Image (cartoon, rainbow, N blue to C red):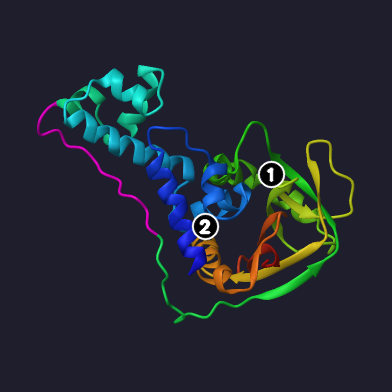
Amino acid sequence: MDWISQLNDAMSYVEENLTEEITLEGAARRAACSAYHFQRMFPCMTGISFSEYVRRRRMTAAAMDLAEGAKVMDTAVRYGYDSPTAFNRAFQSVHGLPPSAARVRGAALRSFPRITFTLSIKGEEAMEYRIEEREAFRVVGFSMKGPMSLENCFERVPEFWGQTAGEIPRLAALMDGSGPMGILGVSACDGGSFSGYYIAAATRAPAPADMAEYSVPAGTWAVFPCRGPMPQAMQDLQRRIVSEWLPSSGYEYAEAPDIEVYSADNLHNEVWLPIVPKK
């Protein structure tokens, strides 16, 4: 129950600071975990990124202020927008109308309520897993880097897979059994921070000129088989791992890469979750 309480404390932090600075680090402190872990878990559990949740909550509160007669510019500043254009864009993305229209009586506005985490006792569907100890291994493939957070990565990964689909046979040819067998989706972690996403294969072969390489450190992973239509089955499994398995497992996230393993027949896909014993 402490874990649920800590997550709700992080949501209280958001509510207490809707008109102040809200940081991922601040929310993570209230959740008693690292910013990297919080950023990884939040989208899996809620279906949206943390930054998007904060934006929706702020625009919900801003709409209420405007409906009560607040001025648009004053409201923009109150919720941290120095630019009227930026505030207008954020408001329209949530409510589908400009801030000025929200001041008109009867305007159709949207409300996004505060998220509350609860303990759900399920257990009707078993979760298969095994624990794998792995020596360090190397992957070679295509990387998505640049100025990007883990939240950006969640939004851009499906597009990246679409762009890379034609290169899968080349990646498959690189596999040599030196790591998980399959085409890998690797969320790289270096120094406790997200450092890029790779679509790659585990191999000892030299990296072709148009590919990049990444070294996955030695560590322990909980490995979960994934069955069903992609990508929905993979997303559902990741959500269950974080919300059902991890809290009661005796483990916590390790500061190491998350790995998705996709088999050639698409029948033996897996999620590799990096873990360490819970402190």
Q: Is residue 223 visible in this depiction of the protein?
A: yes
- The residue that mark 1 highlights is 193
Residue at horizontal 75%, vertical 56%?
A: 172
Looking at the figure, which quarter contains the C terminus?
bottom right
Q: Amino acid at mark 2?
A: Pro
Our reading of the magenta stretch's main secondary structure is: loop
- Horizontal placement of 57 versus 213: left or right? left
Residue 179, relative to residue 248: is it above or below?
A: above
Magenta stretch bounds: 104-116
The tag on residue 72 is none
- Horizontal placement of 64 versus 144: left or right? left
Residue at horizontal 48%, vertical 37%?
A: 22
For disc 1, the neighbor class at 10 Å (few under 14, some 14 to 19, many from 20) is: some
Mark found first going from the N terminus, 2 or 1: 1
- Most extreme residue toward the left is 105
Q: Amino acid at mark 1?
A: Ser
Taking depth in this image into account, of 103 and 197 the one nearest to the observer is 103
Residue at horizontal 37%, vertical 44%?
A: 15
Residue 25 falls in which quadrant of the image? top right
- Horizontal placement of 209 versus 131: left or right? right
Residue at horizontal 32%, vertical 30%?
A: 91
Taking depth in this image into account, of 56 and 4 the one nearest to the observer is 4
Residue 44, relative to residue 21: is it above or below?
A: below
- The residue that mark 2 highlights is 231
